[in-house]
Amino acid sequence: MVDPEESAASGSPELTLSPPEEQILRSLRSSGSPLGEEELAPATGLPADTLRGSLQRLRSKRLLDVEEEHRTGYRLTERGSVARSAGLPERRLARLLASAPGGLDPTALGASGLTEEECSVAIGVLRRRGLLEPGVPLRLRPNVDPGAPTPEEQALDRIAGGERPDEGALPALVRRGLVEVLHSTLRRWRLSKEGAALELERSRGPMIGALTPALLTDGGWRGASFRPYDVRAVVPYRTGPEPHPYAQFLEEFAEILVGLGFEEAEGPLVETEFWNNDVLYMPQEHPARSVHDAFSLRDVVGRITDPALLERVAAAHEGRPLPGTAHPLSRGWRVPYRTDIAERAVLRSQTTAVSARYLARKPEPPFRMFCLDRNFRPESLDASHHIEFAQCEGILGEEGISVRDLIGIFRELAEGIGIRELKLRPSYFPFTEPSVEAYVRHPQLGWIEVFPGGLFRPEVLGPLGIEVPVAAWGIGVTRLAMVALHVNDIRELFSDDLGRLTGRGA
């Protein structure tokens, strides 16, 4: 060990080593060359966590240096493995066209087993490579060999075999979600000049780093050596308080919408059934309005301050003409509308209630509004459900609005947080028609629905006095945060363990 007198003369504390640290130094000294963690683990017999912690402490004591080599690797995604075994969409389409000399109409490709997305990708790839005749029906150019391997197929085979693929084909494969890029760092540790010169000798007696009640009670501190502080050791550096990752994500998501020209609105957390459901043309006997999907409030009764709006909503529900009109908006729900149900108080189960309140103020088109706030539902807690969740409600109202504009908003928002892959399908909601759902892929949970929306029905807009089409959505922004923050369980978002949420903790 270092001579205490020499240490005192130099003004630095006596250098002490733990048994694991001594084991590491002895292993590196006997090796004579740098070693990685995978080589040090069997040489020292230390658990992985103990080994890593000891290496970092030795580095902070300037006894070890580290050489870092950054590596890039590739592996097939689940989708890439399926495409490799079944054939890339462009390969399957080329074989299909080779068996149909007269060509095929694009609308007939659905019966071939190719999905709509695969057909679009395959046609685009074959056209870019100049393998298709212009126009329709789709036909291969003369002398095109449908069995010739493509650069993408060769790259998939090389990656599956553990070889490095041709760089030219990689960007397209990564963009299509067939290949995943893996970044890793290889660290090799070696003795520094101080570490090589240090005389290794076990300290006499146990080294105590902190006094505990047990040590004071049983006298275990007597005869022990106290480990001195190393003032040269690196300490964690913090600039101050840090925002919660989930709260920060919500703020950044709201900024994206503001950048797209939307204004933010707010609404009460305690709502009446009238604003939470009735104005949205949800029938009063709808199953989603049972105790299983909303928190009712005991001994609280709401009050509807706009009798005229109440009458128009009741007329829409019962299939009667709105006051001042000759024809009903639709057949309605064919049941009497009950004011006592409309006045019941509930915890807000959807931020669409904020959209209803906003539209009741009759904004001048064009208008864009969003609300990013909490909602409550009596869900069974699991990895993707929680009784409290954030929803990002939004509406876009002006002449000519269609579902295409809604899908465009979904894509803009997804790309704004780094998600480029969406899966769309038709859906049903009581207050929108047509309706769609967009799914994003979570690495562990698979495809999860986060973008539901559609165009408000006339039974919603008519009573509110809105005369332009309105696209509406209620984004499951909490689930979206799980994808962006790489969280596998929705309950972790409400944790105060910032190290775990940011990937810095143990």
Image (cartoon, helix red, strand yellow):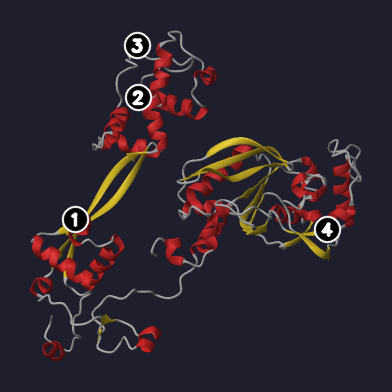
Q: Which residue is mark 3?
A: 142
Q: Callout 3: few (<14), some (14-19), or many (20+) C-alpha neighbours within 10 Å?
A: few
Q: Which residue is mark 2?
A: 129
397 vs 323, left or right, is left
Q: Which residue is mark 1?
A: 39
Write the residue at 79% across / 50% down.
279
Tell me the CA gap for discs 1 and 2. 48 Å
Q: Callout 1: few (<14), some (14-19), or many (20+) C-alpha neighbours within 10 Å?
A: few
Q: Which residue is mark 4?
A: 344
Residue 417 vs residue 114, the one in the foreground: 114
Query: Callout 4, which amino acid?
Result: Arg
Residue 68 visible: no
Residue 139 vs residue 134, the one in the foreground: 139
Nearer the observer: mark 3 or 1; the answer is 1
Write the residue at 40% across / 29% down.
83
293 vs 95, left or right, is right
Query: Callout 3, which amino acid?
Result: Pro
Q: Earlier in the sequence, mark 3 or mark 1?
A: 1
187 up-or-down from 204: above or below: above
Q: Percent from the top left, x then y, of residue 18?
A: 23, 74
Tell me the CA gap for discs 4 and 1. 68 Å
Q: Which residue extends farthest front?
A: 218
Residue 230 vs residue 347, the one in the foreground: 230
Helix, strand or loop at mark 3: loop
Query: Callout 1, which amino acid?
Result: Glu
Q: Toward which corner of the image does residue 95 lie, by quadrant?
A: top left
Q: Earlier in the sequence, mark 2 or mark 3?
A: 2
Q: Callout 4: few (<14), some (14-19), or many (20+) C-alpha neighbours within 10 Å?
A: some
